[in-house]
Structure formats: C-alpha cells, structure tokens
Image: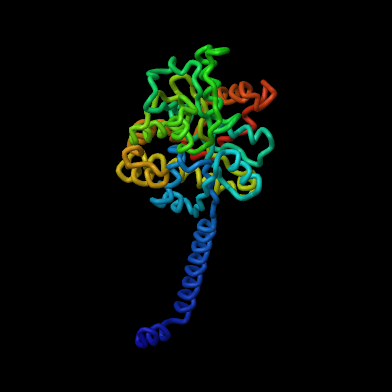
Amino acid sequence: MQERRAAFVREDPMVYVMSRRAALAALAGSWVAWSAAEARAANKLRVGKAVAENWGNVPLDIGMQFGLFEKQGLEIEELIFAGGAKLAQAVTAGAVDIALSGGPDMVYVAKGAPEIAVGTIADTAAFMGISVGSQSTARGIDDLKGKKIGVTSAGSTTYWLVDQLNRAKGWTGADMAIPVVIGGSPSAGFAGLKTGEIDADVGGTSTGYQLEEQNAGRLLLDCSEYVPSIELYVIFASTALVQQNPGAVRDFLKGWYDSVAFMKSHKAESVPIAAKVMGYTPRVAERMYDTLMAKFSTDGRFNPQAIEALRASFIDMKSLDAPSIDMSKFYTTAYLPKS
C-alpha cells in the first residue's frame, strides 16, 4: 500500500489533481444517489384495513411479505379497524394515509371526509355471499323470501345487499327479506344462525366456506347472482397525502397492483399467507383464491357501470339526498400506474 501511494505522489501533479476531482465528483454522485434512496425509503405509509377478514385486502400482506412495496421505496404500517366508519374516522383524524375499504364508503367523501378513491380493488359483488345454517332447507335465492338475514349495521353494504335482494326479486310487504343487525364479526353470524336469531347471513363468501368446514352451514349464493357490477372494494388516499406526497400514492398503487399480479401467478405462496392474516384454514383460503383471484382489478380503473350502481345504492339507502350527485368528485385515476 505504501509503495502504491509513493508511486502515485511521484506522478504528474495534473494527473493527481484530475484524479482527485474525479474522486470528489464520484463521491458527490454517490451522496446524491444515497440521499435519493433515503428519501424514497423515508416514505412510510400507514395503511388501514376496514376489517381483517376480507380477501380483498390480502394483496397488502402479500406485497409486504415479498417486498413489492419496499421495491417502490415504501415502508408500510398495517392497521386494522372495526369497519369502514371507524377507518374513515381515522383518516379524518390524520392517523391513516391509505384506506382499504368498501366502495360504499365513498359516501363519507361526499359528506366531507378528507380522502378520495384512487383505485379499484374489485367491482363485483362476488366477494360477498349469503350463507345459511346446517338446519336450513333453503336451496336457492327464492327460499330467502320473508326470511331474517343478518347484516353488520344499519346503512352498511350488507344492509344494502338485503335491500337490493328485495328490489331484484320484487318482494314487498310480508314477502320481503328482513335485515337484522348482528354486528360485523363472522362469529356473530355463526351464533345467530345457530340460535335461529337469523335464517341467513350476509358477509364474505368465506363465511359460508367456514361454516362448511365446521359442518355448521353452507354458502347459499354469492351476491353477484342478483347484484350487477358495483364498486365493492376501493383504495382511498387521504387528501393530505395526495397534496403533500402524490408520488407516494403512485408508488403504493404500483406496489398494490404488482402484488395482485404476483398473487395470480403464485398460488402456493399466497394461500398460506392469506389464511394466516385472515384467520382462516388453508382450505378456506384456497377456495377463496380459486373463486375470487380472477375477480381482482389488475389496473385499478373505475368501471362506469359499477360507479353508477354505487350512486344508485346511495339513493336507495337514503345515504345521500341528491339524485344528481356528481360521483366523479369522489374518485380519481390520476395516480394509477400507466398501462
């Protein structure tokens, strides 16, 4: 080492000066690159799930597990809430940057929540189903006439699904299916079916698969049987994040749809993670994968028909008063990955 240093000193002074400048330039370039990498890594996002037991939210966990958000320069903090209303409150309080919730939660945007829908997760009601207990003799949709059906809360998506069932079948008066509020957890639905408090339960199709696993009931139908395309699950970004760091919104959406693509081609890796994060058996998670993986949006684009169905649901449920409300104010495609 000493010999090499001595030889270097004996070289032409100009060569030495130029070499030092080059070294300083290289050092400066390294510093810039390091600073840029640090800036990207500093994008920590607090991502809230409306509920844990939702197959539509699984791409978040897949992306975290396999570094697909990290690849976009993001650090994800995952937060779980007890429903969309609680999640919207957290966004309003500034405690959540990205929200994974139901499309019907756009109603909170209409009512002033500081967030906007930035991408579609799924625009089909196939993720939702109506399940019955083991004692039920129901064999199809017509057998739900006049029955008590469990829902999470008044004004919720599940409540609307019962209301839409009555509309689709033209049931009125004593023929109408009756929504019964039982709460948001699958266990509440199981208990209600077992005690006879309800005749059926609206929830994720996974509820029916779990009932079958326990020989306690079965999935009667998925709700796409009577509900047209609707923006069922959506990604929301807080207004603050959109204004202060739009690049992070773009990075998150890129990571999300990369995660969906990964899941589509990696069933063996995805199913165990889904089972763990949702609290399902591997068999239930596998059935969810087989029936629903193909129904995820791969580009996040909003379907006009699904948006219109959502708007109609707001009017039907009296969530919003104005029939002519402009839904385009509640969502944007500006941050979606380029096709």
Residue 141, horizontal then vertical, whole percent: 43, 18
Judged from this view, the residue extending furthest toward the front is: 195
Q: Front-most of 238 and 148?
A: 148
Residue occupying the point 34% across, 42% down: 281
Q: Quadrant of residue 1?
A: bottom left
Q: Front-most of 6 and 297?
A: 297
- Residue 55 in view, yes or no: yes
Left or right of residue 220: residue 316: right
Residue 240, horizontal then vertical, whole percent: 64, 47
Left or right of residue 208: residue 326: right
Residue occupying the point 44% across, 26% down: 130
Q: In this figure, what is the number of numbered marks? A: 0
Q: Quadrant of residue 312?
A: top right
Q: Front-most of 227 and 170?
A: 170
- Residue 124 in view, yes or no: no
Q: How is the image coloured?
A: rainbow
Residue occupying the point 39% across, 19% down: 138
Residue 111, horizontal then vertical, whole percent: 68, 34
Residue 126, horizontal then vertical, whole percent: 43, 27
> In this rendering, is residue 213 above or below 166?
below
